[in-house]
Amino acid sequence: MEGRLTELDGLRERIKAAQGKIPCDTLVRNVQLVNVYTGVVTAAAIGIIGGHVVSITAEPPALEPRETVDGAGMYAIPGLIDAHCHIESTLLTPAALAEAILPHGTTTLLIDPMEIANVAGLDGLLAFMDGMDDLPYRVFIEVSSRVPTAPGLETTGGVLGLAETARLLDHPRAISLGELDPAKIETLSAAHLQKIIAAHRRGKIANGHAIGLSGAELDAYVAAGLADDHECVTYADLAARVERGMKVMIREGSSERNLDALVSGVVTHGLDTRNLMFCTDDKHPADIQREGHIDYNVNRAIELGVDPIAAIRMATLNTAEHFRLDHLIGSITPGRYADFILSPSIERIDPKYVFVGGKRVAVDGDLTVSLPPVRYPETLRRTVQLLRQPTPADFRIPTQGNRRRVRVLELIPDQIVNRAGEAELAVVDGALQPDLENDVLPIFCVERYGINGNIGRALIHGFGLNRGAIAGSVAHDHHNIMVVGTNPEDMHLAVAVVASAQGGFVVAAGGEIQARLPLPLCGLMSERRMAEVDTDLAAVRRAARDIGCSLRAPFMTLSFVSLPTVPDLGITDRGLIDVHGHKIVPLFIE
């Protein structure tokens, strides 16, 4: 009852402040307000009380506000929203992430925490969500629908069944059922279809992951009630989804670079942008620091020819309306949270001031609020428990004969998808040999939860290593330890160091560790500040380049090749996965 009275008192205050009967807490005057409903920019003063906007008129209020901020004629733009991301992929805790996103004007994240859930289950996920009320930005949850992602094809540390999913959908932060891949629809999986029904019964949407679908397969997927997709690679993908009533999240992450192709197509074909949103999905903090976050997506879209207000809508109102949050966020209008940016221009967003709940949280690129302390249970720091310690022999691929034909996972630069290829490799002393000249290397996946001790093996083209190995414990979505390299000894060393650190990224060469980034929180994140993590991330990326890797984000790429749901091939601790066939396939082609 007390909480209800508090909400009632807050609502009464907002009404009275809008009526001019009590003063506002803050008045941000002299701004050019970008109205995402009308598409018009008007001179305004933003009246704020209790963290909410109550007025947007240019006339001075009847009562003197407690605080006045001069907007210096800058444009007031709604706080930017990331429509879909995995916060764990930033390698930072939610508190530390504030340093990366708030200066760039992102005030709300819509997160699918499937990585934590796959590692630590329901209890770990709930522990991770504790303290989010203290963050200086907003977080809403897209409840993870696939934990594990591919039952029977991978080993995970946690499982979310229908009961756990329903419990999470009832959580006050829950806004949707998280991304669901096509395999669950194609196989008519009752366990997953019931989750869609559970979300819809609660008035919440179900997010899509319609990678590679077209025609009748896409129709069936949309008919199942999936509302959106963030996996479009071409404009044809995007148009096909919009035609069928889906919304499309245009993604620009560290390794999945889809924005230019999609937005260029939108501009060329004159497509209405009201069905489009922006997301990062997975983006490392160093890349956010270098180029931006959702503000990068907006600015790049404008450069490619999208009208500035339309681009801003894609990052604000479109997303809020899609997730049924537009009564709270997505615009600078009475009753909504006072989350907005002040920028000198709308042709290129440059957040000089960032407000969340009417408070200045960033000024001129610097955070101006203190970060809440991070308190996580020790169980989230002890998630790497190898059933047995591997030896260098585990990183050989034994076989017979002089040469063998093998399946090869071929990377596509800057994309999450890959191609299924083939190669013929030499056999020496009963072991398959890498082909450094043609960039065909062995890759292994080591089960890390102490459940079965599996080690999956495959061949991959595209890493470009000429010596050494790189390893990491971030491996979507199962998050076992991945390693790719040129020789068993360095691969063994890299995996051993990842395991002893309870997770992280490691580069080894010549029997020595060249660089490392420890990620002991669930083997996914660091509890250090952003600058420290950025320094170590830069070091492991540089070390990877030094041993021949030319990929823009090698560790992000390493994490995605493990996906058993992204075409054409994936690798898990169970082996090489044929994504289209939803099955384990032999490495050798007879």
Image: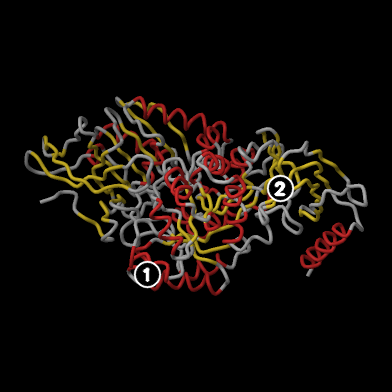
Circle 2 is placed at which residue position? Answer: 41
Above or below, 292 relative to 147: above
Q: Secondary structure at mark 2?
A: strand
Q: Quadrant of the N terminus?
A: bottom right
Q: Which mark is residue 220?
A: 1
Q: Nearer the viewer, residue 309 or 136?
A: 309
- Three-letter amino acid code at the position of disc 2: Val
Instruction: Identify the residue at image location x=65%, y=43%.
Output: 373
Residue 75 appears at what percent x and percent y? 71, 42
Residue 538 appears at what percent x and percent y? 47, 29
Q: Secondary structure at mark 1?
A: helix
**Label 1 to label 2, Cα distance in Å?**
42 Å
Residue 214 appears at what percent x and percent y? 34, 61
- Are there few (<14), some (14-19), or many (20+) residues within 10 Å of tag 1? some
Q: Nearer the viewer, residue 293 or 452?
A: 293
Above or below, 257 relative to 316: above
- Quarter residue 400 falls in: top left
Instruction: Identify the residue at image location x=22%, y=37%.
Output: 440
